[in-house]
Amino acid sequence: MDREGGLAGLGKKNPLAGLRWRRLEEPLGFIKLLEWLFAIFAFGCCGSYSGETAATVMCKTETDSDTEIKLISVPFAYPFRLYRQRYEMPACEDIERRILHLTGDFSAPAEFFVTMGVFAFLYSMFALVVYLRFHEEYTKIRRVPIVDLCVTGAFAFLWLVAASAWGKGLMDVKVATQPSNLVSSMPLCQMEKATCNAGSQPYFALANISVLFGFLNFLIWAANVWFVFKETTLSNKPASKEESAERGEVEDHQ
């Protein structure tokens, strides 16, 4: 008997038992769930990106048998501080090898985008808990929906800024990491002593997806402003004098 009572007590204390999952079928809860998922995709795709740019250098010699093709590969990744990515220019005859670096620092828009995604993920998760567990308190306390409305509007605006900034930053990253720019940055390739060829273009599919999810987050958060607004007292129009008079007459007749 005690064992059964203990199991029943554990079941009652289960925190998931009080959640109202049907709230997810409503626009307010369903959109919050999408915001939570899309935020993960946004900062996950951007923060986990890594690419590589490459070029080949063939030093010209008097005898073709001594010709050697050297591959220069430069990896880069988030947060895209390209000036820290070093690579080695090979030696060719009287030209000594040198350590060079990529150019550009695009960490500001990338880190802002990822930070925005992390905060959106945390707030969406917190809001989901409130909707599913404390929905009655959410509707009774007037200030809570208004605060939610202000935060949702702020996130919608910041998502637009973050996605636009990161989209522009990604375009600059693509230009800075072009293999042709890698070739032009090596003094050896500007002379007739070597033949330099650009390698394959870096793949930016994951980074492009992050920009796409950034703008999708903006659209979702902007659309959610309306549904959160409907939960506030601001959406309830005050009754006019005629309507209140009609209601009074009906009550008198009753």
Image (cartoon, rainbow, N blue to C red):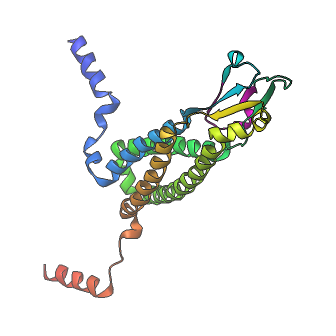
207 or 250: nearer the viewer: 207
Provide residue 123's location: percent of width, then percent of height. 48, 45
Provide residue 160's location: percent of width, then percent of height. 52, 57
Q: Is residue 169 left or right of residue 91?
A: left
Q: Quadrant for the N terminus, please.
A: top left
Provide residue 188's location: percent of width, then percent of height. 78, 32
Q: Is residue 129 visible?
A: yes
Taking the spot 56% from the left edge, 55% from the top edge, the residue there is 164
Taking the spot 40% from the left edge, 54% from the top edge, the residue there is 220
Q: Quadrant for the C terminus, please.
A: bottom left
Highlighted range, magenta: 71-89
Judge whether 44 appears above or below 135 on screen: above
Judge whether 59 appears above or below 252 on screen: above
Taking the spot 40% from the left edge, 63% from the top edge, the residue there is 229
159 or 165: nearer the viewer: 165
Residue 74 included in the magenta stretch of the image: yes
Which residue, as the protein is rendered here, is positioned at the far front? 63
Q: Could you say which quadrant of the image residue 63 lies in?
A: top right
Q: Is residue 60 left or right of residue 4?
A: right
Which residue, as the protein is rendered here, is positioned at the far bottom? 242
8 or 133: nearer the viewer: 133
Q: Is residue 183 left or right of residue 124?
A: right
Q: Is residue 130 left or right of residue 202?
A: left
